[in-house]
Amino acid sequence: MKAVTISSLRTNMKAYFDEVSETEDILIVPRNNNEDDAVVVISIKEYNALIETSHLMSTKANRKRLERSIENLKKGDTKLFSLDEDSNVKA
């Protein structure tokens, strides 16, 4: 995570955006000398991950299902299957 002034961002915008995109680091731009009034720049990949996580955790049922899946994985209670369409066809 890196914090830069708005002046520095204006001057070096392409370089900062390239860095955020390539490293998935977070860029914080404080405004008005107030940390609660800041802008955060993140990569689209990071943004999409946050949105997906938010969706997956949005309901109690989803959270419980994910928790059960994680517990099953930790216990080694897994099932192997293929996503290949040809392998799912029975002769």
Image (spheres, helix red, strand yellow):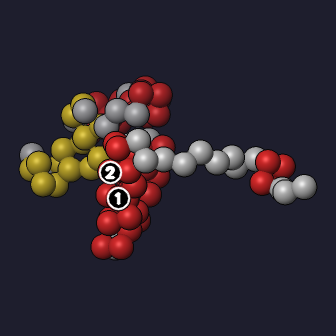
Name the residue furthest left.
34
The amino acid at mark 2 is Glu
- Give whichever of 18, 64 is nearer the camera: 64
Expressed as whole percent of the image width and height from the top left, the position of residue 40 reads: 29, 47
Crowding around mark 2 (Cα neighbors within 10 Å: few <14, some 14 to 19, many 20+) is few
Identify which residue, 30 or 90, lies in the foreground.
90
Image quadrant in which you'd find residue 6? top left
Label drawn at residue 91: none
Q: Is residue 66 visible?
A: yes
Residue at 35% across, 59% down:
68
Left or right: 32 as drawn, with respect to 86: left
- Circle 2 residue: 71
Disc 2 versus disc 1: distance between alpha carbons? 5 Å
The answer, for residue 14, to whether it is visible in the render is no
Q: Left of 79 or right of it: where is 16?
A: left
Q: Residue 75 at what x, y percent from top left? A: 35, 44
Which residue appears farthest toward the right when viewing the image? 91
53 relative position to 6: left or right? right
Badge number at residue 68: 1
- Do the residues bearing badges 2 and 1 touch, measured as CB atoms within 8 Å? yes
Callout 1: 10 Å neighbours few (<14), some, many (20+)?
A: few
Q: Residue at x 32, y 58 (%)?
A: 67
Depth order, front residue of 67/41: 67
